[in-house]
Image (tube, rainbow, N blue to C red):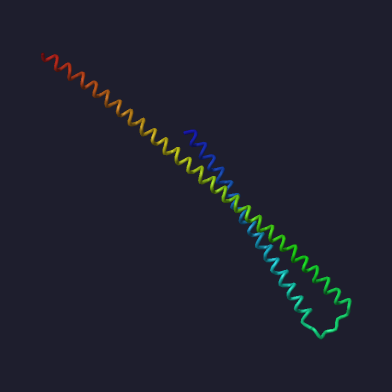
Amino acid sequence: MASLHAFEVAIDLAQQQRDGARALVLQVRHQCRLAQDQLAQLTGYAQETRQRWGARPDAVLLPEVLRHQTQFLQRLEQTVTLQRTVVQEQLARVQRAAQALAQAEARVASLRHVLQRRQREQAQQAQRREQKETDELAMQRHGRAGRGTGRQLTQGI
């Protein structure tokens, strides 16, 4: 019975670890969505800016304004590239967290399976003991009854 209790404690601990892994997956997915949303905003802003500044082919721009616009767009593209990297890192974190969750769930299932098997084994052993005790009791009764009958037969002679 003590070994079953140890398995129950191990299952409780494994379930807590699984629940922590599940919470981490949710947190990392949320962070990934935020990073993806930010990337979408940056990309959209860069497209709008290019369209707005490039939509006037007949406009005459001062060299300083043109240089400023070019530098701004370059920095915006750098920011978009950095954000893509952040999104890729977040996606990798989501994948690692999901793998850790799957491993934790497998551990819980495995421990439960072992516990159930041990419980079945203990129940079978208990059933065998009960059957053995019943058989021994029946043998004892049969032995007493047989001796008594034998005396009665010999006494009548």
In the rendered view, would you say 153 is above or below 133? above
* View extreme (bottom): residue: 58
Q: Please tell me which residue is depicted at 55% across the width and 46% down the height of the picture.
A: 15
Quadrant that contains the C terminus = top left
Instruction: Please give the name of the residue rendered at 75% of the width and 72% of the height, measured from the top-left corner.
Output: 46
Residue 157 vs residue 10: left or right? Answer: left
What is the residue that sits farthest to the left in this orientation? 157
User: x and y percent of residue 138 in the render?
Assistant: 27, 27
Q: Would you say 91 lies left or right of 79 here?
A: left
Task: Estimate the x, y position of residue 57 in percent, counting from the top left.
Answer: 80, 84
Q: Nearer the viewer, residue 24 or 43?
A: 43
Residue at 76% across, 79% down: 52
Q: Position of residue 116 (x, y in %)?
A: 45, 41
Q: Is 33 drawn above or below residue 55 in the view shown? A: above
| Frontmost residue, 106 versus 29 | 106
Give the residue displayed 42% in from the left and 35% down from the top: 122
- In the rendered image, residue 97, in percent from the top left (x then y), is placed at 62, 52
Number of marks: 0
Give the answer, above or below, for where 83 lies relative to 135: below
Quadrant of residue 136 within the rendered picture: top left
